[in-house]
Amino acid sequence: MDNEFKKPTIDLLEDTKPAVIEDDSKEIGEKIVDVLKEINISCIIKSIKRGKSYTSYTCSIKMPSKLENKKDGGKNNDNPLSILKSFEDYIENRTDLVDGITFIIPKKGDEVEIQVVNRNRAHSNLKEKLASKEFQDAPKYSLYIGEDVEGNPHIIDAIKMPHMIMGGYTGSGKSTEIASILLSLMLKCTPRDVRFLLVDRRQCDFETYNESPYSLTRAVIKDEDEFYRALDWIMEEANRRISLFSIYSAKDIEQYNEKWHACMEYLPRIFIVMDEMIDFAYDYDGEIKLKEYINKIVSLSETTGIHFIVATQRPNLLKSDIDVSFPTKISFRMDGISFKGEDPSKLGGSGDMYFTDWKEQKRLQGPYVTNEEINRVLSYVKSENDAIFDPILEKRIHPKTDLAFDLGKNVLSDDIKEAIRISIGDDVESGWLSISRLQRLCGWGWPKAAKVFDQLRELHIYSDKDKFGRITLIISNEEAKRLCGKKNNIKIYTLSRDMIQALTLAQTCEDGIINNIKIQLGFGWKSTRALDVLKLLKTLPVFAYVDEDVLRIVGTKKEIQDIIDQAIIQ
């Protein structure tokens, strides 16, 4: 299923030709030097780096023993950074650079970095950065954040993130940054790897994600009741995953998925993305309730693969320490608000940001991506792939609808189709299903069988449970075959795990021969074990008998894989 999914490609994004922009960085630098000279501060510019949103001047600064006190200017102070910052407004007025100058003192010598917002700014093209070698070679769950002053892409691993909060005014770049993060994940991952739980009370930015295969729910979460019901489910899902890890002796989601085999349930990482968090914490009680949910989920999330990415225009309304749960922070343009001591009021807007995580703080320029590009990517994903939504989760979030699960609109998962096929019958006892029967015939563990069993009950094509815990198919076999796409041309075999391994090895034998020596060397088995497996393989139509320790491979790689995919594992 995962191999069949058609991921969006980089070609769906637009090439933006860089605009021809007048470079006035040298002229502005000279003005700053002149103004500093007026107040007896010696400044020599050593280097200039012009980025998309701001220009960085590395300067050698010599402070005088006594400073002339200008309007709103500085007074003698032991801290040179405080002295220089006290003159920022004065320099801005004298150079006609409104809210655009920031002084930063590096750790070595008398060097000072002066950051100045560009009068003429350029866009950072998302397609160019996602097509870069840095992003293409980055790990699966990588997020593109922005570019530094030298144009280098800044990419983070969501596994190390693991939660992010961003603050900024309308138009500062929050929504575009979220779009960039989601597009990053969609270009690298399939819905088997990652699913989004999107929350947008104002219904402004996420509507195009409705019905997307990447979305966990059919529609974006849009009101408070839906939101908290969804968080209840997330907490239960986190605890369910921890139980699965215990059953299969895995410490976290990465180790569990590495051990994945047919009787286990592959787990995607879940990203809870909220466009305006304060809408659910607009008073003290709301904030306490939201904080309680977030803290509970965050405490389990690193192990279970559940991540928060939240945005807000008003982080100052977080009266308590709710932002402590988010070690990764992005500050866009804001006044009088700071996550980590920076001054976002000096940022230029439109993607100009301070990015902070557990190891560094950097000033970056976020990408530019249009609504047309986002719609194009989502349209492609929805038109080329089926979207599968959990009927239990859908009904739980929207309990007032009281509608039966719509088989015409919902695409059934492969696991549900397999369960329906079993109840159709032909070669096995037909008509009824139970959790234990699903375990036995599908080779699933109890957690997976129980989950599929609950989903089947929501389809309204089975009766209620009887006293033996069984449900019975109440539609005709023909209707059931139409729903699950019954494959009459493929026989289902019961195979041991040793046989599955040997079949996988057979797909790599270029000489068309598999024997006991190859199996022994491939898996480190003893000769008797390898010969026993060969005897069992002889019964499969993809092999022809040569002698007791040699088989000729007569089936194609696809035919062998079909047997593996359809097998019931003992």
Image (tube, rainbow, N blue to C red):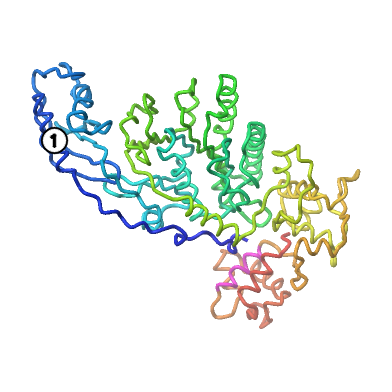
In this image, 482 relative to 142: left or right?
right
Q: Position of residue 20 (x, y in %)?
A: 26, 54
Q: Residue at x 66, y 52 (%)?
A: 264
Nearer the observer, 446 or 268: 268
In this image, 312 relative to 441: left or right?
left
Nearer the observer, 125 or 131: 125
Q: Position of residue 185 (x, y in %)?
A: 49, 50
Q: Residue at x 21, y 45 (%)?
A: 49
**Is 344 located above or below residue 303 in the figure?**
above
Q: Which residue is mark 1?
A: 31
- 504 in magenta: yes
- 534 in magenta: no
Q: Residue reaching furthest right?
A: 467
Quarter location, residue 425: bottom right
Is the magenta region chiefly helix, strand or loop? helix
Q: Position of residue 98 (x, y in %)?
A: 26, 32
Quarter location, residue 500: bottom right
For the record, the magenta segment spans 498-508
Image quadrant where one finds the C terminus: bottom right
Image quadrant where one finds the N terminus: bottom right
In this image, 457 relative to 567: left or right?
right
**Is 190 located above or below residue 174 in the figure?**
below
Quarter location, residue 204: top right
